[in-house]
Amino acid sequence: MYPMAFTREGDKIIIKDLNGGQGIVGRLVDMGLNVGSEAVVVRNQNTGPLIVSVKGSNIALGRGLAMKIFVDNVR
């Protein structure tokens, strides 16, 4: 398990944990980033926002927020 900010473009991931207060976790859940959700990393160039595809929608996440989302690779 590692922060989403450390993923590579093209990685298929599953969300394992959301680290943050109620506001942050609520916002992520509203965007479809629930524990157990699968996503694909569309863009991660180690600077700027990270873009992930979840349930057919692309979502841009700042690096700080991506550090609070813990993921594993889908096997």
Image (cartoon, rainbow, N blue to C red):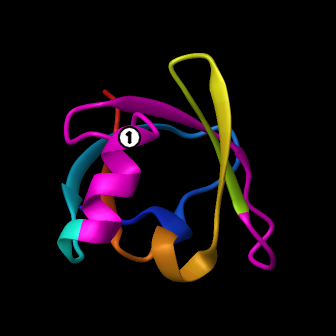
Residue in the image at 29% along x and 45% along y: 15
Other residues around mark 1 within 10 Å, as few (<14) / some (14–19) / many (≥20): few
Which residue has dot 1 on it?
A: 30
- Tag 1 secondary structure: helix
Residue 61 visible from this viewpoint: yes
Residue 33 visible from this viewpoint: no
| Quadrant where the N terminus is found in the figure | bottom left
Q: Please name the amino acid that badge 1 sits on.
A: Asp
Q: Which residue lies furthest to the front in this view?
A: 23
**Magenta-tinted stretch:** 23-49
> Is 41 inside the magenta-drawn segment?
yes
Image location (x, y in percent) of residue 66? 49, 69
Residue 42 is left or right of residue 34, and the answer is right
Residue in the image at 80% along x and 67% along y: 45
Relative to the observer, which residue lies in front, 23 or 39? 23
| Quadrant where the C terminus is found in the figure | top left
